[in-house]
Amino acid sequence: MTTYNNSWNNAFPGIAAHSVIIGEGAAAAVGVLLAAGNILIGTTAGDPVPANLTPGAGISITSVTGSITISWTGANLWVDQTTAAVTMVANTGYTSDDGATLVTFTLPTAASIGDFVEIQGKGAGGWTIAQAASQEIFFGIVHTTAGVTGSLSSTTQYDCVKLRALTAGATSTWSVVSAVGNLSYV
């Protein structure tokens, strides 16, 4: 093990203990003391600055001395649906898993543009997507009947579909962005 004496510390007088040293070229080096959770963020205008990470939607960041933890705070992104009916939640996927019973998935009552829902078939009973008043699903050049009489359904056990919301609100319009199987629409 190599042991150093305090002569190195003397090369940087006035810099606080535990500081990060930033070179200044010909000028004297500076020390930056970081608070718990700080990291150095580069700038184009000068020295890096100490800052905390900023969480986006559905993300949490916990900073303590010597540690930063980044976590997802959203709801369960995938649900094993084992009952015959459910109103879907935006940005959630479902496994249709009620044995020989048909599972009816109703589109979310409210959606934002870009929200998704996804269904993966598993149970032999298959699945169908029911719509609320004024809702509609587009699948290429075909589409479901607008409103509560329209639906999109699996025809075989392992059919799957992913829908993306094209309009917002309770009267949302959805589009099939991926599908496996020969889906049936009304």
Image (cartoon, grey):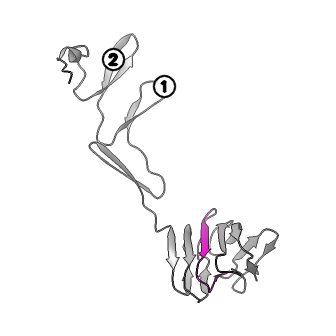
x and y percent of residue 46 in the render? 45, 24
| Residue placed most toward the observer, 106 or 159 | 159
- Where residue 25 is drawn, which disc sits there? none
Would you say residue 71 sits in the magenta stretch? Answer: no
Residue 117 in magenta stretch:
yes
The one nearer the camera, 57 or 159, is 159
Q: Earlier in the sequence, mark 1 or mark 2?
A: 2
- Mark on residue 29? 2
- Residue 186, placed above or below residue 24: below
Most common secondary structure along the magenta stretch: loop
- The residue tagged with tag 2: helix, strand or loop? strand
* Residue at image location 60% in from the left, 65% down from the top: 115
Q: Marks 1 and 2: CB-CB under 8 Å?
A: no
Task: Please tell me which residue lies in front, 19 or 119.
Answer: 119
| Residue 144 rendering spot, x and y as whole percentages | 76, 78
Q: Position of residue 149 (x, y in %)?
A: 72, 87
The quarter of the image holding the N terminus is: top left
The residue mark sitting in front, 1 or 2, is 2
Q: Residues within 10 Å of mark 2 (few under 14, many from 20)?
A: some
Residue visible at 61% across and 66% down?
116
- Label 1 belongs to which residue? 45
| Image quarter of residue 126 | bottom right
Disc 1 crowd rating (10 Å Cα; few below 14, some 14-19, many 20+) is few
Point out the stretch of residues depicted in magenta. 109-134
Amino acid on which the number 2 mark rests in the picture: Ala
**Amino acid type, residue under disc 1 in the picture:** Ala
The reply, left or right, for residue 91 in relation to residue 146 is left
Q: Is residue 150 left or right of residue 57?
A: right
